[in-house]
Amino acid sequence: MAKSQGQQFIGWMGLTFNAPENWDLVQAKGNRFDGYLRLEEDGVLRCEIQWTLVSAGRVVLDEQVEHYLKSLEQILRKQGKPVTIRKNIHIVSRKQVKRNVRDFMWESNTVGYGMMWFCEDCRKALVAQVVGYEHEPVKEWAKQIFLSLSDHSEGDWEVWSVYGLEFEAPKGWNISKSEIMPGKIKFLFRQGEYELSLGRYGPASVLLKGKRLEEFAVEALGKETVERFNIHYRIESLHNHEGMVLVGKDKRSNNPFHVFLRRLRTGNPFPQFRGWLWQCEQSNRIYTVVGAIAPEHEQLLEHMARSVRCHEES
Ligand SMILES: [Zn+2]
Ligand SMILES: [Zn+2]
């Protein structure tokens, strides 16, 4: 992704934008219908983005902005400082972002720049604001974020980029679980009964102390997967690293009784297990991209695995 000096690229659930690289994404929650992102710098709020899907009806942006600014003003006034609010400040235009958009700013004990937009393609209504102090380049930050912001991807793939983990996930697969903790990031995408998941673990030097990659793989896949599938692997080079290609069959597919019931119920064969796992020396991390999928999803899994940027190529 295009990224300039001193900036980070963030991708979350179809939303993408550039922000100063020393800001931390401290909250990312919600789903496609309602979501919220929060960035802070050393514990101080810098940017918030919130979105909601408007399923039907006309969105009158001016009314929404009015409503929003009224409640913002109430909150600011409670802090006991005079509040100035200005609308239509022309830091972002419809022509630039190709969406119906309004911008505004306020000054109180902090300075804030905000915008609200409605995307007619995906029907997302979104409000974003950037906050700082008078002596800080808040307007420049806001411009940078607002003008780089996109609320949906144009192609079949969505770019995810958080905490230095960047990859592409297929559109139409909904994220059903995300685990973000020190040493582990894992996303699970689901479509019906099928699943794709991507994990990053580290530091590899600690996780693999006295342990082979195969043993780590069993742990990372989890008990449920290991019990459900008969999994075979072969050592293969992935992303120029030592890795494993995993192939598995649902254990129930060996049982004619289960196969019979399954056919009656769904007409589809049991999902198969496919996966890639590799150790990246440069980033000192282990990556997994695995799926319980139908044969037609194999290319999706491979695309997702290949899209992971495990280290910066020099
Ligand atoms: Zn959109
Ligand atoms: Zn790597």
Image: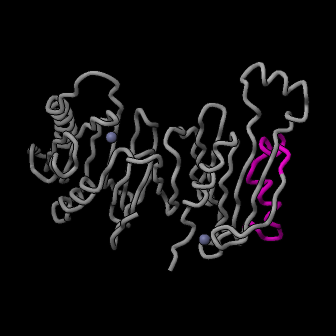
From the viewer's perspective, tell me whether residue 53 is left or right of residue 230.
left
Q: Position of residue 40 (x, y in %)?
A: 37, 56
Which residue is found at the position 35% from the left and 67% from the top?
7
Which residue is found at the position 24% from the left and 55% from the top?
147
Residue 169 forms part of the magenta stretch = no
| Front residue of this view, candidates 285 and 236 | 236
Which residue is found at the position 60% from the left and 76% from the top?
282
Name the quadrant containing residue 2: bottom left
Q: Position of residue 67 (x, y in %)?
A: 18, 30
State whether residue 110 is above or below residue 272. Answer: below
The majority secondary structure of the magenta stretch comes to helix
Which residue is found at the position 82% from the left and 67% from the top?
212
Name the quadrant containing residue 139: bottom left
What colour scheme governs how the chains and residues are painted in the rendered image of this protein? one colour
Magenta region, residue range? 207-231
State whether residue 8 is above or below residue 282. Answer: above
Ligand 1 is located in which of the four quadrants?
top left
State whether residue 107 is above or below residue 201. Answer: above
Q: Position of residue 234 (x, y in %)?
A: 81, 62
Q: How many marks?
A: 0
| Front residue of this view, candidates 109 and 16 | 16
Quadrant the N terminus occupies: bottom left
Residue 213 forms part of the magenta stretch = yes
State whether residue 203 is above or below residue 294. Answer: below
| Front residue of this view, candidates 230 and 81 | 230
